[in-house]
């Protein structure tokens, strides 16, 4: 079963020193049939999706002023429609009462015509209210319904204005007073029903009072003039008070929405705090698992080294010594592999590795995979094949893409017992898809989300190093994040696993990746090298190795010692190697600067360090110096030295 840590999903942005608590959105698709991979209908596809940020929206991301005004306005209009049936029934009852009272004093045909018209308008208002309730319009559409209501209430107001003229009995002061009382009551009711929405208020109240006041004033007489003035005063009072009441209603609604917004913010903050607490607990548990697994995996080769060293001291023959030295070499290689992968994770989390997008032929990368993994697959009796890819140009970082695919293929070869491993490549619109499929035992659904965690291995409780370290897919996930790619995993227990990496298509003209010239393993005869390291054993080991390569090597433990062995104006070394953290709080960067200043020239230099803390890695990145991480092999040291010297010969500043 596949082990290790896994790949990133759809453009995730997960960071953290111990990134086990991914909390990704896991999508499971039953019946997925990936191309070129024998899957059963129980295949499950897992994609790591972009996680929701664990924060709360900023204040400016809450309701904007415009949105808040719209919500307040919508609520005011809803208040209108809520009261519309009651006001319509009340107005209809008042109309019937007036028609009954005026039947013997006004020509019946005019009374019936007025009553019929008013009833038609009221029926239209009932229909409008029913349509409102049936459609329940969204917030952005509510203002349109407010305009509909204003038109309907204005039409009813025109009917009532006409009624003030039709039902007016000239010379009959008593009935004129009754008519005025009815209209004054209608105006008060209209005020109560429409003060939440000023357009409706400003239409209905003047239509109820102004025509009546004008008719009374035209009739003449002291009492009628007083009644007309009272109607005018009531009109002005209702409009002024209605405006104030409207502002109070709007402010109340606004405060309610603001309070709801604040309550929502508090709930978001509580949820974010709870999520942060859970993530902290998960991170703490993940860190404990990480350290426990790393401690176990480090102790194994260290234990072997101690035993082999003791055996070497007591070896009685040359053959025994050679065999023991070989064992020591394998244990050292295991340590270097583990430290290298731990360092890779730290460098990726610290942002130490930067992607450089260039166009390159994916076929060259796939051919490297064939060269590197076909022999191992053949040794296990597996069929290893690469389909397509030749002439497929993509735009990304060639080195990091090769690292991703190498880890995926290594996993496939390691955990496939029989059958085949297939690497397929094909164009998919604006992208190029690379699939790594195997016919291994697959991954159970409950384990799939966890294979993306550091040191998580299924079926390896004894931490057998021959089954891998459980870090490869964690590195893949981080590389996918850096490159902003998409990687999905589909697996079915008993039927294999498939990874699909989507790469942006590229053109050869987009700046192809430069070819890397192979460099031989020649030594450095006569090269003057100065090593600055506060560890005596490291200094002695470096000097011994450099001298074997023909270098004139010297080593010091501090900046002061370096300056003592270099008199002012001295030519100085040809290459400077400095440990990043020296005693007394000094830094290797300071040692390089001090030696260059003493020698009055730019000396090729690089740093070495065993520090994997993210903060230190970021400091080194900002300094601009190249760094080789301990423990490193002799070959890596040789390659770094050649790179520094080649840069100096080409006029490139190594620092």
Image (cartoon, rainbow, N blue to C red):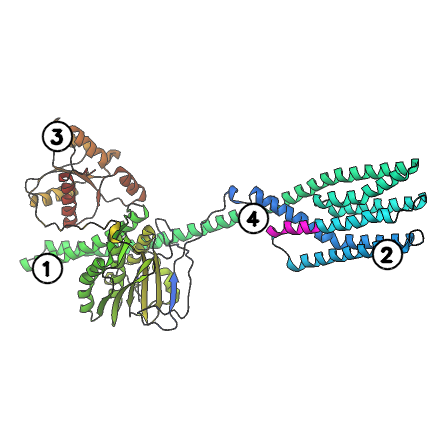
**Circle 2: is it few (<14), some (14-19), or many (20+) Cα within 10 Å?**
few
Tags 3 and 4 touching, CB below 8 Å: no
Find numbered disc 1 in the image and state the secondary structure of the residue it sits on: helix
Which circle, 1 or 2, is nearer the viewer? 2
Whether residue 500 appears in magenta in the rendering, the answer is no
What residue would you read off at disc 2? 112
Q: Is residue 113 left or right of residue 16?
A: right
What residue would you read off at disc 1? 323
Numbered badge on residue 58: none
Which of disc 4 and disc 3 is earlier in sequence? 4
Q: Is residue 59 left or right of residue 228?
A: left
Q: Which residues are magenta?
A: 139-149
Residue 111, image quadrant? bottom right
**Circle 1: is it few (<14), some (14-19), or many (20+) Cα within 10 Å?**
some
Which of disc 1 and disc 4 is earlier in sequence? 4
Whether residue 147 appears in magenta in the rendering, the answer is yes
* Mark 1 to mark 2 CA distance (whole Å): 121 Å
Which percent across, then down, holds residue 532?
17, 37
Which percent across, then down, holds residue 72?
63, 46
* Mark 3 to mark 4 CA distance (whole Å): 68 Å
* Mark 4 to mark 1 CA distance (whole Å): 70 Å
Residue drawn at x 88%, y 52% is 98
Tags 1 and 2 touching, CB below 8 Å: no
Which of disc 3 and disc 2 is earlier in sequence? 2
Which circle, 4 or 2, is nearer the viewer? 2
The C terminus sits in image quarter = top left
What residue would you read off at disc 3? 566
Q: Is residue 28 above or below residue 569?
A: below
Which circle, 3 or 4, is nearer the viewer? 4
């Amino acid at each position: 079963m596949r082990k290790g840590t896994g790949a990133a999903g759809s453009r995730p942005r997960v960071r953290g020193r111990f990134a086990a608590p991914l909390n990704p959105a896991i999508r499971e698709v039953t019946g997925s049939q990936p191309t070129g991979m024998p899957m059963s209908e129980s295949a499950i596809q897992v994609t790591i999706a972009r996680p929701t940020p664990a924060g709360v929206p900023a204040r400016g991301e809450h309701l904007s002023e415009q949105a808040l005004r719209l919500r307040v306005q919508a609520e005011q209009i809803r208040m209108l429609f809520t009261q519309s049936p009651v006001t319509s029934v009340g107005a209809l009852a008042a109309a019937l009462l007036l028609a009954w009272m005026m039947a013997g004093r006004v020509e019946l045909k005019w009374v019936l015509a007025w009553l019929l018209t008013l009833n038609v308008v009221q029926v239209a208002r009932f229909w409008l209210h029913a349509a409102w309730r049936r459609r329940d319009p969204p917030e952005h559409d509510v203002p349109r319904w407010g305009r509909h209501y204003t038109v309907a209430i204005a039409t009813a107001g025109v009917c009532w204005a006409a009624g003030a003229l039709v039902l007016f009995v000239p010379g009959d002061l008593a009935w004129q007073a009754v008519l005025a009382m009815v209209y004054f009551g209608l105006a008060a009711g209209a005020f109560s029903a429409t003060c939440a929405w000023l357009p409706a208020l400003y239409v209905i109240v003047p239509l109820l009072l102004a025509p009546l006041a004008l008719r009374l004033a035209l009739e003449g007489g002291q009492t009628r003039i007083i009644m007309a003035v009272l109607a005018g005063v009531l009109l002005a009072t209702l409009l002024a008070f209605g405006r104030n009441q409207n502002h109070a209603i709007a402010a109340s609604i606004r405060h309610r929405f603001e309070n709801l917004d604040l309550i929502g913010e508090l709930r978001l903050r509580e949820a974010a705090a709870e999520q942060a607490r859970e993530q902290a607990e998960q991170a703490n548990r993940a860190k404990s698992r990480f350290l426990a697994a790393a401690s176990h995996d480090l102790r194994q080769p260290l234990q072997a080294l101690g035993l082999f060293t003791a055996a070497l001291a007591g070896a009685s023959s040359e053959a025994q010594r050679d065999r023991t030295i070989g064992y020591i070499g394998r244990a050292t290689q295991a340590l270097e592999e583990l430290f290298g992968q731990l360092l890779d994770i730290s460098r990726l989390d610290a942002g130490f590795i930067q992607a450089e997008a260039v166009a390159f032929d994916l076929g060259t990368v796939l051919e490297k995979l064939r060269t590197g993994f076909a022999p191992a697959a053949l040794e296990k009796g597996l069929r290893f094949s690469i389909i397509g890819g030749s002439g497929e140009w993509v735009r990304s970082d060639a080195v990091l893409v090769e690292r991703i695919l190498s880890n995926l293929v290594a996993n496939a070869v390691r955990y496939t017992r029989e059958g085949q491993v297939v690497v397929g490549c094909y164009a998919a619109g604006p992208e190029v898809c690379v699939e790594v499929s195997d016919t291994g035992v697959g991954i159970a659904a409950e384990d799939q989300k966890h294979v993306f965690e550091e040191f998580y291995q299924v079926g390896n409780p004894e931490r057998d190093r021959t089954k891998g370290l459980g870090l490869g897919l964690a590195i893949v996930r981080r590389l996918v994040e850096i490159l902003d790619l998409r990687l999905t995993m589909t697996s079915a227990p008993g039927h294999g696993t498939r990874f699909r990496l989507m790469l942006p298509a590229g053109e050869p003209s987009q700046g192809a990746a430069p070819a890397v010239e192979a460099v031989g393993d020649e030594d450095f005869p006569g090269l003057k090298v100065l090593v600055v390291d506060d560890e005596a054993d490291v200094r002695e080991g470096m000097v011994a190795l450099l001298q074997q390569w023909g270098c004139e090597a010297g080593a010091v433990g501090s900046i002061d010692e370096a300056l003592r062995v270099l008199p002012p104006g001295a030519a100085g070394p040809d290459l400077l190697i400095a440990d990043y953290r020296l005693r007394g709080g000094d830094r290797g960067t300071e040692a390089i600067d001090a030696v260059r200043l003493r020698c009055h020239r730019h000396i090729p230099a690089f740093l070495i360090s065993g520090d994997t803390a993210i903060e230190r890695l970021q400091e080194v990145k900002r300094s601009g110096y190249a760094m080789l991480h301990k423990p490193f092999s002799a070959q890596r040291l040789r390659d770094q030295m050649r790179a520094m010297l080649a840069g100096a010969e080409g006029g490139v500043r190594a620092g």
